[in-house]
Image (cartoon, helix red, strand yellow):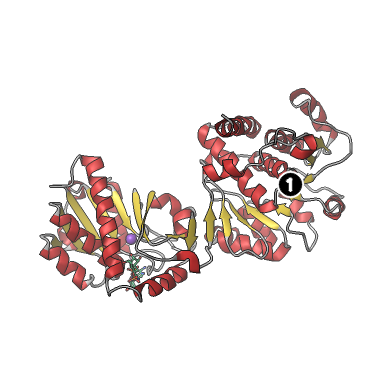
Amino acid sequence: MQAFTVEQVRRLEAAATQEVPEGALMQRAAAGLAVVVAGELERRTGRAYGTRVLVLVGPGNNGGDALWAGARLARRGVRVEAVGVLGTPHAEGLAALLAAGGRRLDPTALGDLRRYDLVLDGILGIGGRPGLPDDVADLVARVEAAEVPVVAVDLPSGVVADTGAVPGASVRADVTVTFGVVKVGHLLEPARARTGRLVLVDIGLDPTTETPELDAWDVARVADAWPWPAQRSDKYAKGVVGVDAGSETYPGAGIMATYGAVHGGAGMVRFLGPESAHAVLTTNLPNVVFADGRVQAHLLGSGWGDRPDGTQAVAAAVDSGLPGVLDADGLGFRPDELPESWLLTPHAGELAKLLGVARSEVEDDPLAAVRAGVERTGATVLLKGSTQLVARPGVRTVELAVPGPAWTGQAGSGDTLGGLCAAVLAAGRPAHEAAVLAASLQAVTAAAHPGPLPPHVLAERCADQLGAWWQERHP
Ligand SMILES: NC(=O)C1=CN([C@@H]2O[C@H](COP(=O)(O)OP(=O)(O)OC[C@H]3O[C@@H](n4cnc5c(N)ncnc54)[C@H](O)[C@@H]3O)[C@@H](O)[C@H]2O)[C@@H](O)CC1
Ligand SMILES: [K+]
């Protein structure tokens, strides 16, 4: 699934408008919206006829869409009531609603909102500036407290369409019906959680003229793209990972990283980290070797702490010409310039430090931040967190891994993720693909095995998940 910016949507809409009569796009949007709302009413109450819908109407075309859809619903026997909450409502849309038997209410006459079966949020769309005025925010809070299902028109009002930020009050939708193309904010947290189920209505835009801002992977694409071993693949075809992670202070990070590499399907894992980790690894992962030798991808940095020879260790690995993953403390030892074949795996705090900005700056616009990380380092960058983004040099489109539940937000998850990435890298895949595949695998596995599993146990479940995908593909 691809997502676009507001500026791009405006261009696409302008191009499409040249081809059709005035108002046609809004009619297509309203028709699609009314079908989804009617379906939602039927699913929730068993019928559309006789149900009650409250339309919250803002000053722009977003409110226009909502009013025209309200008119269509009113003609089907839905009792539609519209309330203007900002500015002057779309004149033709309001006239159409009234002509179809809908009513206009004064905001002061709203009463108990629990009498509505559904609320339609037509307050703001892609023309919305962040946040909502206080009186609108109060009304939105009342809707939420009344637990009435909400369908958002194009975007949940109050979210930032281009970044996914939610700087103030916003609508929390059960369903969002968007038009033409998906917008960036639908897919990035925290706006993603406010979007609910996303329905895309075709209004005749042609997105092929624009480079997508975001390319969101889904589970089937991840499973199809995984580097499955061929029948005659030996350990070198699957790839050897060299893990130089952990330290005497943090041996666990090296162990976790090794669990990730093993369960991500590496042909062999060489552990080059601290001796204090050897006994645990020998007992639990006896296939891991400790001798120096051939590797096909490096994994460095997790749990290094303040390693005295960190700079030299990273330089030597990069100079080998092999691809690698540089994680956590290792990020502080990176050379000025890295090749694209190296993958950096910072979380928001680490990326902020790398860029010399506040963490909130990364969190407010992760798309810009992950691109800036690439710009700064030359490497491929995976920004870890609730939405996991991958950017690489020379490519505008940022890839979005399959999202998962927050269970993976615990110490050690980043270490195992680094190992999973390194396993895919060692199998010969480019760094951006290794990052998307590994991050998605971890998320999908966490969704299938919810609960506070320690990261190394979740890594074992990752192997089960890979097994299940493989069986689906090799019946
Ligand atoms: N342009 C097109 O061809 C189409 C647009 N469509 C709809 O039109 C929407 C965009 O319409 P508009 O460009 O009119 O924009 P909006 O409907 O999002 O609203 C813009 C208006 O809201 C005001 N406003 C913005 N943020 C505010 C805030 N925080 N507090 C108070 N007032 C605020 C602005 O001053 C402006 O008057 C889309 O989201 C979509 O729903 C659809 O009908 C499909 C076709
Ligand atoms: K809206």
Q: Furthest-top residue in view?
A: 283
Camera sees residue 106: yes
- The answer to which of 230 and 56 lies nearer the viewer is 230
- Up/down of 50 relative to 274, above or below: below
Number of marks:
1
Residue extending farthest right? 292
Q: Residue at x 80, y 48 (%)?
A: 306
- Where's residue 350, x and y in %? 66, 54
Residue 294 position by quadrant: top right
Disc 1 Cβ-to-ligand 1 distance below 8 Å: no
In which quarter of the view is residue 249 placed? top right
Q: Secondary structure at mark 1?
A: loop
**In which image quadrant can residue 63 be found?**
bottom left
Q: Is residue 164 left or right of residue 83?
A: right
Is 414 situated above or below 104? above
Q: Residue at x 52, y 63 (%)?
A: 212
Residue 358 appears in the picture as rendered: no
Q: Which residue is mark 1?
A: 428
Q: Is residue 197 left or right of residue 390?
A: left
Which of 303 and 96 lies nearest the eye of the viewer?
A: 96
Q: Residue 219, percent across and down?
A: 53, 42
Q: Indicate which quadrant contains ligand 2.
A: bottom left
Q: Quadrant of the C terminus?
A: top right
Residue 148: where, in percent of width, then height?
A: 26, 47
Residue pictured at 77% horizontal, 27% vertical: 280
Check disc 1: other Cα within 10 Å, few if <14, some if 14-19, many if 20+: some
Tag 1: residue type?
A: Gly
Tell me: 472 left or right of 44.
right
Q: Position of residue 448 (x, y in %)?
A: 51, 33
